[in-house]
Amino acid sequence: MDTITFGILTISDTCAKDNAKDKSGEELMQLVTNRNDEIGKILKGKILKREIIPDNEIDIMRTLQEWADNLEVNVILTTGGTGFSQRDVTPEATKKIIDKEAPGISLRMLTTSLTITPLAMLSRAVCGIRGKTLIINLPGSPKAVRECLSAIAIAIPHAVDLILDNKSKVANVHTKIQDSPVHNHSCTHRNKNNSNVSLDLKDIANRLRESPYPMISMKDVANILNSYNWSGENEFVDLWKCRGRILADDIYARCDLPPFRASIKDGYAVIASDSKGKRLVYGGLEAGHMPGKMKLRNGYCVRVNTGAPIPDEATAVVQVEDTKLLKKHSDGREEMEIEILVEPKEGQDIRPIGSDIKEGKLILQRHTRIGAVEMGILAACGHTKVQVTKLPTIGVLSTGNELQQAGEEPKPGHIYDSNKITLIMLLQEYGYNSTDMGIAIDDENVMINTIRDAIQHVDVLITTGSVSMGDRDMLKPILKQIFNATIHFGRVNMKPGKPTTFATFEFNGVTKYFLCLPGNPVSATVTAHLFAIPLLHRLSGNNVKPTIVQARLTCSYKLDPRPEYARAILEWSSDAAIPLAHSTGNQISSKLTSCKSANALLMLPGANSECSEMKEGDIVQAMLIGAYL
Ligand code: AMP
Ligand code: MG
């Protein structure tokens, strides 16, 4: 190879703000092109691209993708972002867009750097190949850049030759996938069985124009989701931490409640058969004290507080309001004699032992969701640790080239990602914590690598976007072909959310679940309620069912051919048997404000020849949505 083309990419928040600070990028330009330098002599480099970008994973992925795919530079050298600080994400971004790793190059850099400084241990550089481009992460300091590049320079021309040759060989061994919704191929990947498969997402003209997945009903969806269950794994959690969790086992009372005969009133413990009239006051018993040797005899009474134990001989408690003071002790402060004004009845105002809860009695059934009151019952019965179901681990991933993180400088043609925060918070409202898996751009490698990474960490991956009919909607073919996942459904007869997809896949003996929701924010939110929450309930052993009520429409609805879930605010009033359903406005699926304040999804039936409209005053079913239903 006579000349090698290079892209030099500096990745640093600081340098992106002040380009003059980019010493490493400058150093690399010199090293690669200076034919008087040892490294330059070997590399014979020509710079095709040079850029400085901040430590932003998506920007890094996009730049690497663009330089490799469109410019086809031979080598991209990145500098910066390989360390341990929170913003250092160069290796993560690189890993997601490469086809193959080239660990030998990173190893060579590492071993060389370690002979100079032990701190080289902290470098996480990744090297690999995307298409015809070799991508090498270098550290951020000019000195380290020189050391690392000089350690690997000798191999770069050879590596470039191999990559260019290899590409043509690899192209001949592509395996054609026959049963896929897309044909032809544009790049090869290793699937679960470690064989090469290819995905062709670039044959746009010949792509299918209708989804190959059968349209299934919501009833079938329910049957499919209900066929999954809690794995049976459980764990003990501290009483104070079990809120929102699901009991893995039945819970029995460890003690009687009350554990002693207790007074229900502030008053006097008496022998009921003494009837009303005078009593000498034997003394007082406060809550938290036991009667000890105190014995109650006829004609006497003992002053007691609510919740105090009463002497064994007492057969009734008379409330203080039904008594009168007759005589005080000489100090003038203590009672000596009182009068009982109302005839006491046997057992009056005494809680017998175990009258609230009997020791050994079943107090909470397995699969109960633990809320505030359940925690109180557990505490009252002496439980400090609770056996609960192990919750599935969940990841939430947004997909789309157009997405930006909130807070970033707005870019042309982009929108802020609203799905991820909505979904993560919605799941949390139902008691499910999830991990932010970031944004995957619409690139096969990024999607595949992101999913590969995700399944190492989570049981359930919930994605939004990339399941419709667009030429960049690649999730279904990727799941099917690369992961050999079983797609249980890929099209549902409902609105909004028709392309919602559910797939499972066995990974190291564990089932992984993929719930791929459409990208439109309303569709994502509605399908999260209708598909994600029920699936998570199943996997957590939570037997709760959705609450469906009847509601009266306050406006008319033109029915869609598909059953529709319209967002509404139900209003209950004391003078109407059924709540009024107020529409949240325009129901277009991009308009997230139509979900604002909604506490129900109206279950509008699909239009048919007899009925194409629901009128104001009509009654429909409505599924309640919101926290902790
Ligand atoms: P898709 O399902 O990927 O075809 O996307 C459908 C629509 O939803 C497009 O207008 C996207 O820009 C939008 N969209 C996709 N993902 C998101 C997201 N995470 N946040 C906000 N809008 C999104
Ligand atoms: Mg998309």
Image (spheres, rainbow, N blue to C red):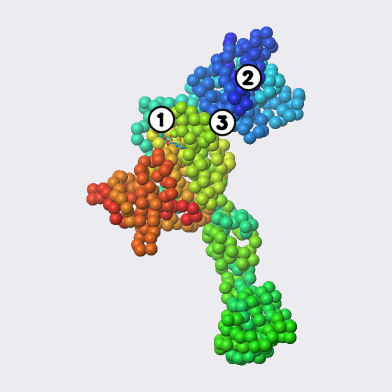
Residue type at the position of mark 1: Asp
Name the side, left or right, on which 391 lies relative to 515: right
- Farthest-out residue, top: 36
Q: Is residue 238 above or below residue 100?
A: below
Q: Residues within 10 Å of mark 3 (few under 14, many from 20)?
A: many
User: Considering depth in this image, is 153 or 70 the residue closer to the camera?
Assistant: 70
Which residue is disc 2 drawn over? 20
N-term mark: 2 or 3 = 2
User: Considering depth in this image, is 377 or 6 the residue closer to the camera?
Assistant: 377
Quadrant housing residue 591: top left
Q: Percent from the top left, x then y, of residue 482?
A: 49, 34
Which residue is disc 3 drawn over? 57
Residue located 39% across and 52% down the image: 569
Q: Residues within 10 Å of mark 2 (few under 14, many from 20)?
A: few
Nearer to us of marks 1 and 3 is 3
Q: Is residue 194 above or below residue 600?
A: above
Residue located 44% across and 28% down the image: 413
Q: Percent from the top left, x then y, of residue 111?
A: 72, 25
Q: Percent from the top left, x then y, of residue 561?
A: 30, 45
The residues tagged by marks 2 and 1 sit, at their Cα atoms, a distance apart of 41 Å
Nearer to us of marks 2 and 1 is 2
Q: Percent from the top left, x then y, of residue 510?
A: 55, 45
Ligand 1 location (quadrant): top left
Residue located 27% across and 49% down the image: 613
Name the side, left or right, on which 117 lies relative to 266: right
Residue type at the position of mark 3: Glu
Which residue is disc 1 drawn over? 471
Q: Residues within 10 Å of mark 1 (few under 14, many from 20)?
A: some
